[in-house]
Image (tube, helix red, strand yellow):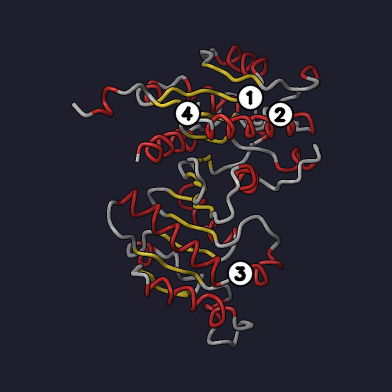
Amino acid sequence: MSDDATMPPKKIAITVGDVAGIGPEIALKCASSAEITAFCTPILFGPKAVLERVASQFDLPMPTVVDLPLDNINALIPGQFSADTGRASFAAVCTAIDATQDQQTAAIVTGPIQKEAWHDAGIEFPGHTELLAARTGTDDFSMMLTSEAISCVLATIHIPLADVPAALTSEGILRAIRMGADALRRRLKRPPRIAVCGLNPHAGENGLFSHGEEARIIEPAIEQARQEGHDVIGPLPPDTAFTPAMRSKIDVYVCMYHDQGLIPLKALAFDDAVNVTLGLPIVRTSVDHGTAMNLAWKGVANHASMMSAIRMAADLCSG
């Protein structure tokens, strides 16, 4: 018997996301799953009173909870986010980050937040990824969305599309290639096959459909990655990069902007895709879907993505 088999299950911090959405329901469903508790101890971070209300409504057991109370709880209406729900979800993430950095928990799995609620609460961060990077003092990080069907690393994250060309750098693309290669190597136990997408239609068509971004920015990153020994092709025309024939040859795509990677990923793996923040000193995974306010507290929310995120978090912090 290995030493790992005799160790107690790792504690995984699970933030419940915006409590006006489906986060409390899917977190409670996962925390009570025998499949999950067989390999880890889930600890929920969020307003305990709200979780008790949802657990009672759906006859789910209450797991261990780190209580981050919700202001004006009597005003909470399922399906209606507010500045109060934004503050609560933000506090849960911050507390879970601190707990994991202090090694009280082994990894973080984040539930879906409502970004407008963070904005309404005066929170400056556009999302989880940027908050995690700032709170852990991380400058070099990337966002990877992964599933059995497809994996994508993003060279830029939550910025307006019009700002993407100016934000792209060869160094940033090379960083995304390296981080994607490292993550998939650990997952696949072999060097991964990497594809880098172009920014423009037809990958710029040799400058005809671009301002030279492929030649000036993307190709130098690919060449450097090849010199470092990575198996990488590109820049590929984005409209044909994700066909079944191409996906059969590729383990991970490096995409130039958010929707370039998220559209094919969600089309292929909406229910079980996982968001992984690469480059952090701690393990963080997340569901790859939103708060689904229209489904809040109705007992119909699909918790498959969170189940996958918990499994991946446990695997990554064991590796």
The residue where tag 3 is placed is 168
Q: Could you tell me how far apart the alpha carbons at marks 3 and 4 are, in whole angstroms? A: 34 Å
The residue where tag 4 is placed is 12
Instruction: Identify the mark nearer the N-term, 1 or 4.
Output: 4
Crowd rating for badge 2 (residues with CA inside 10 Å; few <14, some 14–19, many 20+): many
Question: Image point 60% across, 43% down: which residue?
Answer: 132
**In this picture, residue 211 sits left or right of residue 190:** right
Whether the residues at callouts 2 and 4 have beta carbons within 8 Å, the answer is: no
- The secondary element bearing badge 1 is classed as strand
Instruction: Identify the mark nearer the N-term, 1 or 3.
Output: 1
Q: Which labelled disc corresponds to residue 88?
A: 2
Whether the residues at callouts 2 and 3 have beta carbons within 8 Å, the answer is: no
Q: Nearer the viewer, residue 296 or 27?
A: 27
Q: Could you tell me how far apart the alpha carbons at marks 1 and 4 are, in whole angstroms? A: 14 Å
Establish if 197 lies above or below 10.
Answer: below
- The secondary element bearing badge 3 is classed as loop
Q: Could you tell me how far apart the alpha carbons at marks 1 and 2 are, in whole angstroms? A: 7 Å
Question: Image point 50% across, 51% down: which residue?
Answer: 279
What's the amino acid at mark 1?
Gly
The image shows residue 204 at horizontal and vertical percentages of 56, 81
- The secondary element bearing badge 2 is classed as helix
**In this picture, residue 119 sits left or right of residue 291:** right
**In this picture, residue 186 sits left or right of residue 57:** left
What's the amino acid at mark 4?
Ile
Q: Which labelled disc corresponds to residue 46?
A: 1
The image shows residue 164 at horizontal and vertical percentages of 66, 67
Establish if 27 lies above or below 143.
Answer: above
Whether the residues at callouts 1 and 2 have beta carbons within 8 Å, the answer is: yes
Q: How many callouts does the rendering have?
A: 4
What's the amino acid at mark 2?
Ala
- The secondary element bearing badge 4 is classed as strand
